[in-house]
Image (cartoon, rainbow, N blue to C red):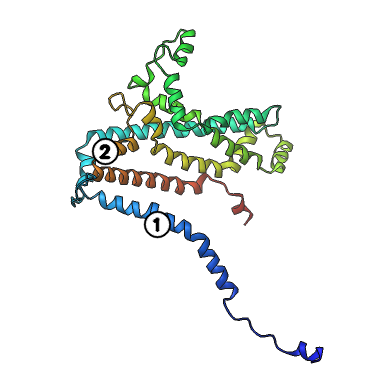
Amino acid sequence: MSSATAVSKPRKKRKGMTRKTREALAFYACVSPWIFGFVVFTAVPMFASLFLSFTDWDSFQTPNWVGIQNYVKAFTDDPLFWKVLGHTFYYAIVSVPLSLLIALYLSNLLARDFKGKRIYRTIIYLPSLVPLVSAGLIFKWLLKPEDGPIDAVLSIFGIHGPAWLLDANWVIPAIIMLSLWQVGGGTILLISAINGVPKELYEAAELDGAGHYRTFWNITFPMITPILFFNLVTGIIGAFQVFDQVYIMTAGGPDNASQMMVPYIYNSAFKDFHMGYASALAWILFVIIMVISGAVLKSSDAWVFYESEVKK
C-alpha cells in the first residue's frame, strides 16, 4: 500500500464516550462526596429537627405531634426565652461592631512598612489559634474577683474591680472581652485587603495633597469593604451562635444572667430532655439569623464597593 493511499483513507470515528460526557462524569465524581455529606450531615438533620419541633419528643419515648405548641410556648409561656434572647442580642450588638472597629484599627496600623511588622502581626494573630475552651479557662482565671490579675492591675490605679463573672451586670461584658481578644483572624484578612489596594490610587491621592485620614476614608476604606462585609456577616452568625465562651466561663450564670440562645438550646435538649422544644428554639434562632443576614446582604448594595463592577 502506497503512502498516498494511507493518507487519503478516512479516519475511523472513535467509539465510546464523548469528551463532554467524560467531563460531566468527572464533575459529578468530584462533587458527589460533598453532596452526600451535605444530605447526610446537614439536610437530613435539619428536616428531622424541623419535624421534631412540632412534637413533644423527650429523646426516649415516641414523639407525639403537638403542632405549633412549642413555638407558642417559647413566645408566650417561657420568660427565660426572652431573657436569653435579649442577652444574645446584647452580646451580638456590642461584640460585632467592636470587633470590626478594633480589627480595622489594627490592620490599618500593621499594613504599614515598619521594622518588626511580621512579629507584631504574629502576636495579634496568635490568640486566634488558641482553642476557645482554653481561652475561656484563661479568662476565667484572669477575671477572678479580688485576686485575679485584671483586678490586681486595676487596684494599682486605685480602682476596685467588679466581680466580673459573678456580677450580673458585668458577666456579659466579660464574655465580650474574650471575643475581642480573638480579633486576629479578621485583622489578617483586612491587612491582606489593604495591601491589595492599587498603589496608583495612593500616588494620585498624594499628588492631590490628600492627608492620611482623607486617603483612608476615600481610598482604603471603600476598597476593603468586601472584606469588611465578609467579617460583618460571619461575625453576626458567630455572635448569635456563641456557645463555648458561655459554657466554659459561666455556664449561663449567675442566675441565667449570661445565658445565651445556643447554650439554652443545649440545656433544653440534653439536660432537660425537651428535644422537641429545643428543636423549636433552634429554628427560631435560625430564622433570626437568616433575617438579619438577609438585611445585611441587602444593605451591601449601598456600601460595599466591588472594583470589578466599576470596570464593567
239 above or below 9? Answer: above
Q: Position of residue 309 (x, y in %)?
A: 59, 53
Q: Position of residue 19 (x, y in %)?
A: 60, 73
The percent coordinates of residue 306 (x first, y second) are 58, 49
Where does the C terminus fall, quadrant-wise? bottom right
The answer to whether one can see residue 277 in this image is yes
Left or right of 210? Residue 50 is left
Secondary element type, mark 2: helix
Near mark 1 (Cα within 10 A), the count class, few <14, some 14-19 or many ≥20, is few
Q: Residue furthest front?
A: 1
> At which x and y percent is residue 209?
71, 34
Relative to 136, does residue 151 appear above or below in the rendering?
above
Q: Is residue 302 left or right of residue 171?
A: right
The mark found on residue 39 in the picture is 1
At horizontal 57% and vertical 72% (from top left) the residue drawn is 20
Residue in front for this viewpoint, 15 or 295: 15
Specify the label residue 182 is tagged with: none
Residue 77 image-quadrant placement: top left
Residue ID for mark 2? 268
Of residues 11 and 263, the one nearer the viewer is: 11
Whether 281 is drawn above or below 139: the answer is below
Quadrant (top left, top right, bottom left, bottom right) of the N terminus: bottom right
> Which numbered disc flags the more N-terminal residue, 2 or 1?
1
Q: Is residue 218 above or below residue 3?
A: above
Q: In percent of the image, x 69 and y 27: which residue is there? A: 116
Image point 51% across, 31% down: which residue? 130
Q: Amino acid at mark 1?
A: Val
Which corner quadrant of the image does residue 203 belong to?
Answer: top right
